[in-house]
Amino acid sequence: MKVDFILNDRPVTLAAEPGANLLELLREQGLFSVKHGCDHGECGACTVLLNDNAVNACLVLVHTVAGKRIETAEKFSDHENLHPLQEKFIESGAIQCGFCTPGMIMALEALQRKNPEPTEAAVRDALAGNLCRCTGYVKPVEAAL
Ligand code: FES
Ligand code: FES
């Protein structure tokens, strides 16, 4: 099966097994910011943007992304310049082991596109699906605000 979609602003045609999920496909492309955590939609480590909405890539079947836009955290870094959210995470000390961080950045990017001036409650709500075992969320929320 081949699927055409837009991946980090570039049109792609990628082959996948029927029933494959987007998490597997993206990691096969070397997009390792998309973390393989629970594989069941519980941890948010695989969060990507699908047409500007944060989704768990492990729950998205590849054939459903045909014609859509997918974005991962790789889009935001050219190894010299970081996304402002990434800068703030570093400045605020919001990263410990870092496993959850790309998923958090994508969840917050989705929020920012809809709501550029979010309240703390909105930020916490946006991160509700992203489990972090390290930070306690105080620093990530501070960074986002
Ligand atoms: S790996 Fe997708 S939500 Fe955990
Ligand atoms: S920084 Fe380690 S899981 Fe969040």
Image (cartoon, helix red, strand yellow):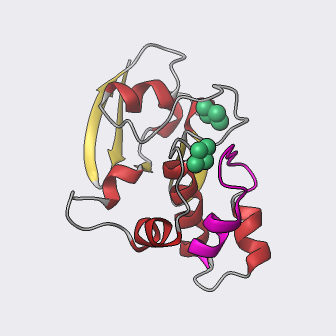
User: Image height check: is 49 above or below 5?
Assistant: below
Residue 145, percent across and down? 62, 79
Q: Is residue 23 magenta?
A: no
**Left or right: 139 with respect to 35?**
right
Q: Is residue 131 magenta?
A: yes
Q: How many marks?
A: 0
Instruction: Determine the residue positioned at 75% across, 66% down.
Output: 124
Residue lying farthest to the bottom in this orientation = 117
Q: Nearer the viewer, residue 112 or 128?
A: 128
**Left or right: 52 with respect to 75?**
right
User: Image height check: is 46 above or below 75?
Assistant: above
Residue 36, percent across and down? 53, 29
Question: Residue 30 appears in which quarter of the rendering?
Answer: top left
Residue 69, percent across and down? 42, 51
**Left or right: 140 with respect to 66?**
right
**Left or right: 16 with respect to 80?**
right
The quadrant of the image that shows the N terminus is top left
Q: Give the residues in magenta.
A: 128-145
